[in-house]
Image (spheres, coloured by chain):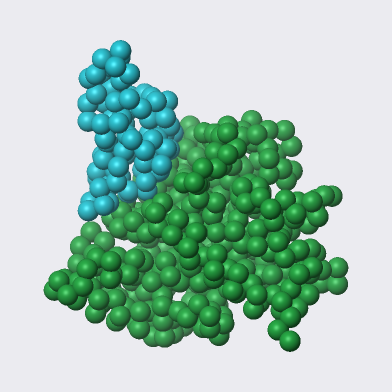
Amino acid sequence: MGELLTEFPATVVLDRYDEIREALFNPNLSRTFDSRSYAEGNIRDGVVSISHGPVHRARRRIENTQFRPDVLRLYERDLFPTVLDGLLDVLIDAPTVDIFPVAELLSVVLAARRAGIDVDDSDLDQLRELVHYVDVFSQGSAILDAKDPEAVRQMVYEGYDAFERDWVRPSWDRRADLIERHRRGKIGDEDLPHDILAVLLVHRDDPKLELDDTGRVVREVATYLQGGTHTSAQTLVNALDLIFDQPAAGELVQRCAGDLLFSQRVIHETLRLRPTTPRIRRRAEADTVVAGRAVPRNGLVILDAIAGNRDAGLFGPNPESFDPERSVDPSVARWGLSFGAGAHQCPGRSVGGGFPIPADGHADEEHIYGLVALELRAVCARGVQPDPAGQPERDTRTERFTRWAHYPVRFERWHDPA
Amino acid sequence: MTLEHDLAGGAHVGVDVLVDPDLCIGSGDCVRLVPGAFQIDEDQGVSVPQDGAATADIDLLVRAAQGCPTQAIRVVRDGAVLHASN
């Protein structure tokens, strides 16, 4: 029987960029704090983001195939622009709008496709239902920071059951049928879906993946749906919040509307200042040394990404200020440590954040800008501005200050359905 | 792979570029950074050094090794690893 670790023989806090990075690359530090089974209470049992060692690497090998540059370009250039414009025309139907749920609906479309959940892009009720699950699973993924972990645990259990029944199972059955026909030579490679659920089902017999438990497949798909939606939505809102806080907010909005590379710079600067996980936790699987400090087995290592991302030696003077055009050495990610690093670095970082800004400041035709930059450009092109009558609200269910619940904005240009 | 080409030909004498297939997770970061030096074997899901590593900028090879998520890449010259830490 496993256990949920809540007490540790030692706690080490690291707040320097290089020390945090070293810790993230340390193979003896894992994200596993709960070794219980799903039935015993570990709501994230077996998902890739908390697995460790050979199982984690085997899972990432097959899942990373869904994040190749050609796939990213297909999504960014062919699929997303149409979806984005179509949804914004429907969702921005009044001069004042809460942008957070809009951001979630935009992001969930492609997150669902990548995860392998079949959804009608034009059906807002379906999209809102998926966003509901994203919210549930997001609270689950941040359970270490939850104010009421037991309530979150129960909600997530119920969420998985309904999500499997209503969404995963139909998508699973369609893919299983296609995979079987492919194995019999009835259809070609081009007829197989390219998404996480499909690759999990194709490779499920591989014992290294440890996917014999159906529930693990469901939780893995849920992880990608949640990760692909939540972080993107929160980053868009944080970007607007930072822009609105600048004296030249109007000019910044105009630049974002007309310059996609500048929009991407804004997103990278937003990620640096507002990491989705401000305090990253790791547990020592074995006695180890991090940044010259001994950490015993089961020791807790806390990585202060907020502080690490504000290293003046790497990000220049006034690292706490919002400066999308700050000078950063090409060997350092402009988003700092916000996508993590090492084995557990975010697999979808190029989906949301695109490729690194080219050192010469010019993007060639191979460049990927990232979906959030496209979203930012689109809302800026509609003349987004703060709503003087509305009050943004943070998500008070978590200690993570970078999460929003509501963010009212006004648009100069909006679509009147009448 | 081992690169034993003459420096006059633009390559690096005695430089080994190695990828440990047990550690590699096929992130593709190395391919994006030094496209001619690495390629993903999609059947195995891992990166494989290519002939282009022989003429690649050695600083980029070292950066690829340092940035590899699982530290699966080693760039070795005359028996010495060129990247001691990430």
State which quadrant residue B73 falls in: top left
Q: Nearer the viewer, residue B6 or A143?
A: B6
Query: Picture coordinates of residue A250 (x, y %)?
Result: 81, 55
Query: Picture coordinates of residue A390 (x, y %)?
Result: 82, 72
Residue that appears at 50% across and 59% down: A76
Q: Quadrant for the N terminus of chain A, please.
A: bottom left
Q: Which chain is green?
A: A
Residue that appears at 23% across and 51% down: B44
Work out whether A307 lies above or below A403.
above
Query: Picture coordinates of residue A249 (x, y %)?
Result: 80, 53
Residue that appears at 73% across and 46% down: A322
Label total for image: 0
Query: Picture coordinates of residue A302 (x, y %)?
Result: 54, 48
Q: Is residue A242 left or right of residue A30?
A: right
Q: Quadrant for the C terminus of chain A, please.
A: bottom right
User: Visible in this render: residue A161?
Assistant: no
Give the colour of chain B: cyan
Work out whether B79 lies above or below A412.
above
Work out whether A256 lies above or below B59.
below
User: Visible in this render: residue B72?
Assistant: yes
State which quadrant residue B21 falls in: top left
